[in-house]
Image: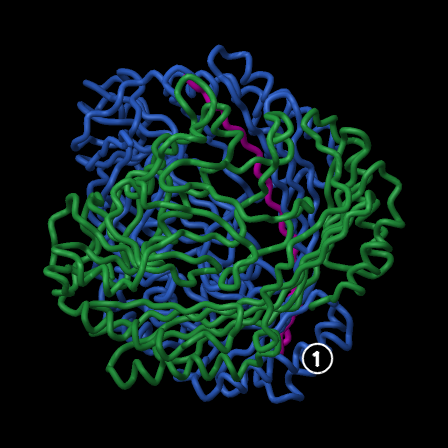
């Protein structure tokens, strides 16, 4: 690989690049799905290729190909340089990369069992057994179960001298059950709260789809007959399986520095967390502390080096409710507006990237993506039962559902999988048709209690979309159950 | 890279010759896609990727599986065929498995333009410079995306089916922001022929919107008459079209389920002025000749004068129900009326004019209730004129409900490979305000 990489780096430099990097990567995915009593799909995909990124007079150029051979690599490197040269007249601010030490190393997700090595029959048996378990529940009409395994084998080299080999695994087993009422045409679905993780097949074994299935089926049936919520203001208790997505959208995206300065204005949007807010803006209540962390074990964004070749790390984003930093990559650290904002906020000068660069394929341009971001658990002992007991009129929401947030990440609306009415400190039964709508700062400032670390759990996604063309990044978000006072709850039932 | 019919046949035949399964299908896709992004009135990043993917689907009786690779040398082809067959041998039997199709007749769909296939980075840089120039002249900040691709798709199987299709596409989108982001305007242009993508006109429209939207005023959330520009119609209707699966309807888990059993084909689901069809052969859409399974694409009418005429039937479900399979819609056309969005504005007493939507998601699939936000150009229209910009809204609304309240349609225009009109509708539910721009 190093030899092939050198072909690209040498060709790019000979053609005039002041910096170049190459990623040669093989992306494998196995996807299995079963509905009711049969396996619907068994699919293995493999994508192998390389992408060369160059800087010419402070202007990016990029080209990629699936033909990983010396001659093509040299041609593609020269094509990247030619693109940079064509773009140079329309470039305004020159790209300047902050210094980063060269790394020569390797890293592999510490998996116990390689999911690609597990016999297919073992996997399909789990799916069919889970479906069968769900279908034993009266009223459960349909069941879908699936497993996705991803392996990203990536070699990165750059003209700074880095040569990094990484072997990243991700596993996602899940199922959903649908109950229907043929007389009314009504139907409800309950998807299990199993999140994708940076793990091997051990995640499938721990997730226990077969054990989960009847409970999901019971809840789908119960949801079909649950009373519709009375709209109004409620204290919400959000389980981590629900809260992770709200965090992803309302804190993860607005702290991306490229959005903050306007680079994503045409599609993903900008951010309400403008640079003047750094170090001073009360994002949330004093119990709210967020950290970004690409070293977190089993996190989906976890690796040793990002796609700039920078060693990954952890850093705070919100401390005691105050915004204290953003997510960065190499080309952002020297931006004068970021440096000025840090100085104005009295924050120490930063001379390194936090390592939040990622490209979802060899054919994609690497840019700034979310790290794993988590809400720190409450410092005082607190159980979910105690939190419910302390709540007079509320709704306890489990699982993620419908989700939407505006382009600056302020106005959001989220739903869930199941909703429980909390009355006088007790669960009073299931509700239906619930969505909560809020403005980001009001919501996080209404957070008054977070359970302790015993209840801290990670959610996450394999498909966070950003960029043009859109790229799918993967990241985890951990939290413990938390309470939010007096949040606006809508009833989503309509007649058409 | 683009492979012609002869090159494709050679690879397909070779792959098929390595197969030992009862049935084998080989799909081959590839091409080049290139793009340039810009923001803050300057070029930012770019892309330019050649790709080629071979997917082999193998079947032994009712057992089947698929494997794909981006490598096409002899060794890689042998490996991918062997991988698909190995998986298929041990996959459980699928009672819903449908045998491969035999040879098919395909419509002469060829959405191709040599100018797009031959476009060089300088063509994109020139388009980007147009937007930046306009922004700088108007004191605005521009950002956007100029993309084009030339791609082919082919399918062949062990029963003698063969199909090859190609297409080019180009699209330019631009957002202009005024006063450090206090207002914004968006516009786009798309065509199979990059020479027809008018970057200057799109930049002008986006700039005019950003300037007209300055000092946006708040409006109380509620139900208002609306005018949706074609991009907004496309954003909104796409979600309804994703619900057109016949099987889900027949199984009782769709808006198109008929209470008591069956589906709503033949029932009125929209206003009489709504006709939605698809025609892959139309010269202004991006159609395809066939689906991944080789099923020919052909014109379909989905909703005619408000009556549901067709749902999407897979080969399996069509066989089960005794009807013809439809494949997915390709070359979508929403029938319109005459004139442009300006004529709808001129005819409006009062309405909210929506340029485009953002982050639309399902809230309740039973009513196709969607939520999302307005973005990049929201205006108050009164007595036939745009009066001022409005602050953005979140909505909770169903496209089906809106299609029952349409009061006017413009002539359809090209949007994302489809033909879509602007529409005026009598009521649209805005749920809450958003200060975001």
Relative height, residue A146 to residue A277 (above, below): above
Looking at the image, residue A371 sits to the left or right of residue B305; the answer is right
Q: Which residue is under mark 1?
A: A75
- Badge 1 marks a residue whose secondary structure is helix
Magenta highlight range? A155-181
Please check the rendered image and state whether residue A159 is part of the magenta-colored stretch, yes or no: yes
Relative height, residue A406 to residue A340 (above, below): above
Measuring from the top left, give residue A258's x and y in whole percent.
38, 67
Please check the rendered image and state whether residue B313 is part of the magenta-colored stretch, yes or no: no
* Residue A254 in sight from this viewpoint: no
Relative height, residue A67 to residue A224 (above, below): below
Tell me which residue sits at (82%, 33%) in the image.
B60
Q: What colour is chain A?
A: blue
Q: Quadrant of residue B202?
A: bottom left
Residue nearest the viewer, comparing A225 with B293: B293
Subunit that carries the residue with mark 1: A
Tell me which residue sits at (30%, 77%) in the image.
B204
Tell me which residue sits at (24%, 48%) in the image.
B407
Measuring from the top left, give residue A148's x and y in whole percent.
61, 40
Residue nearest the viewer, comparing B144 with B277: B277
Measuring from the top left, give residue A322's x and y in whole percent.
25, 55
Looking at the image, residue A456 sits to the left or right of residue A35; the answer is left
Rendered green, the chain in question is B
Measuring from the top left, give residue B65's x and y in whole percent.
73, 38
């Amino acid at each position: 690989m190093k030899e092939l990489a050198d072909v690209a780096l040498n060709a790019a430099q000979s053609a005039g690049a002041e910096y170049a990097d190459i990623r040669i990567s093989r992306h494998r995915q196995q996807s299995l799905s079963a509905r009711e009593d049969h396996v619907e799909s068994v699919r293995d995909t493999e994508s192998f290729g390389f992408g060369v990124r160059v800087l010419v007079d402070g202007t990016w150029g990029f080209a990629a190909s699936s033909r990983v051979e010396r001659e093509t690599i040299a041609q593609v490197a020269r094509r990247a340089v030619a693109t940079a040269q064509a773009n140079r007249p329309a470039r305004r601010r020159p790209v300047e990369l902050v210094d980063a030490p060269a790394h020569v190393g390797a890293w592999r997700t510490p998996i116990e069992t390689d999911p690609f090595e597990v016999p297919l029959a073992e996997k399909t048996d789990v799916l069919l057994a889970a479906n069968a378990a769900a279908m034993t529940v009266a009223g459960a009409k349909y069941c879908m179960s699936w497993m996705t395994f991803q392996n990203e084998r990536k070699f990165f080299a750059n003209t700074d001298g880095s040569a990094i080999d990484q072997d990243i695994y991700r596993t996602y087993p899940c199922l959903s059950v649908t109950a229907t009422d043929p007389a009314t045409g009504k139907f409800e679905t309950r998807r299990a709260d199993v999140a994708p993780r940076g793990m091997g097949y051990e995640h499938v074994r721990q997730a226990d789809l077969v054990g989960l299935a009847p409970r999901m089926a019971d809840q789908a049936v119960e949801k079909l007959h649950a009373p519709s919520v009375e709209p109004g203001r409620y204290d919400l208790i959000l389980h981590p399986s629900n809260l992770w997505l709200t965090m992803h959208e309302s804190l993860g995206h607005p702290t991306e520095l490229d959005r903050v300065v306007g680079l994503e204005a045409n599609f993903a949007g900008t951010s309400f967390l403008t640079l003047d807010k750094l170090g001073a803006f009360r994002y949330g209540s004093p119990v709210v502390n967020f950290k970004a962390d690409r070293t977190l074990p089993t996190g989906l964004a976890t690796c040793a080096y990002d796609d700039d070749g920078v060693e990954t790390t952890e850093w705070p984003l919100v401390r005691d409710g105050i915004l204290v930093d953003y997510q960065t990559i190499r080309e952002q650290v020297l931006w004068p507006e970021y440096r000025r904002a840090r100085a104005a906020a009295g924050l120490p000068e930063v001379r390194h990237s936090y390592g939040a660069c990622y490209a979802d394929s060899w054919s994609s341009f690497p840019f700034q993506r979310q790290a794993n971001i988590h809400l720190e658990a409450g410092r005082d002992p607190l159980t979910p039962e105690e939190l419910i007991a302390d709540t007079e009129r509320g709704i306890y929401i489990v699982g993620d559902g419908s989700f939407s947030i505006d382009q600056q990440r302020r106005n959001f609306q989220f739903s869930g999988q199941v909703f429980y009415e909390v009355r006088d400190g007790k669960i009073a039964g299931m509700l239906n048709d619930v969505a909560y709508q809020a403005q980001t700062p009001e919501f996080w400032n209404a957070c008054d209690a977070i359970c302790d670390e015993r209840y801290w759990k990670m959610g996450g996604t394999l498909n966070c979309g950003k960029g043009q063309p859109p790229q799918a990044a993967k990241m985890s978000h951990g939290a413990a159950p938390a309470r939010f006072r007096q949040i606006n709850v809508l009833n989503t039932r309509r007649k058409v | 890279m683009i492979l012609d019919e002869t090159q494709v046949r050679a690879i397909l035949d070779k792959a098929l010759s390595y197969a030992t399964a009862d049935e084998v299908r080989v799909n081959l896709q590839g091409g080049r896609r290139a793009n340039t992004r810009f923001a803050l009135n300057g070029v930012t990043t770019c892309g330019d990727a050649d790709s080629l993917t071979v997917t082999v689907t193998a079947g032994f009786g009712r057992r089947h599986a698929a494997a794909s690779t981006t490598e096409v040398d002899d060794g890689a082809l042998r490996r991918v065929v062997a991988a698909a067959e190995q998986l298929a041998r041990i996959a459980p039997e699928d009672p819903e498995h449908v045998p491969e199709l035999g040879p098919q007749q395909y419509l002469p769909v060829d959405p191709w333009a040599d100018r797009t296939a031959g476009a060089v980075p300088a063509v994109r840089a020139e388009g980007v410079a147009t937007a930046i120039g306009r922004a700088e002249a108007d004191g605005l900040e521009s950002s956007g995306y100029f993309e084009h691709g030339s791609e082919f798709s082919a399918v062949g199987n062990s029963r003698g089916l063969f199909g090859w299709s190609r297409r080019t596409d180009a699209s330019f989108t631009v957002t202009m922001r005024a006063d450090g982001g206090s207002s914004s305007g968006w516009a786009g242009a798309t065509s199979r022929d990059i020479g027809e993508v008018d970057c200057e006109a799109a930049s002008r429209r986006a700039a005019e919107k950003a300037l007209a939207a300055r000092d946006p005023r708040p409006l109380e959330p509620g139900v208002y008459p609306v005018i949706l520009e074609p991009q907004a119609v496309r954003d909104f209707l796409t979600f309804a079209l994703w619900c057109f699966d016949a099987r889900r309807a027949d199984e009782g888990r769709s808006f198109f389920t008929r209470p008591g059993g069956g589906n709503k084909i033949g029932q009125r689901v929209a206003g009489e002025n709504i006709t939605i069809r698809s025609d892959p052969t139309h010269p202004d859409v991006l159609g395809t000749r066939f689906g991944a399974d080789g099923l020919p694409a052909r014109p379909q009418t989905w909703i005619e004068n408000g009556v549901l005429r067709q749902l999407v039937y897979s080969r399996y479900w069509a066989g089960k129900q005794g009807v013809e399979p439809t494949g997915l819609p390709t070359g979508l056309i929403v029938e319109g009326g005459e004139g442009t969005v300006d004529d709808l504005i001129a005819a409006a007493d009062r309405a909210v004019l929506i340029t485009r939507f953002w982050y639309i998601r399902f809230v309740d699939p039973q009513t196709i209730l969607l939520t999302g936000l307005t973005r990049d150009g929201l205006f108050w229209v009164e007595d036939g004129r745009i009066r001022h910009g409005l602050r953005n809204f979140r909505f909770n609304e169903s496209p089906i409900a809106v299609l029952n309240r349409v009061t006017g349609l413009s002539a359809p225009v090209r949007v994302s490979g489809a033909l879509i009109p602007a529409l005026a509708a009598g009521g649209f539910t805005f749920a809450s305000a958003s200060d975001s721009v």
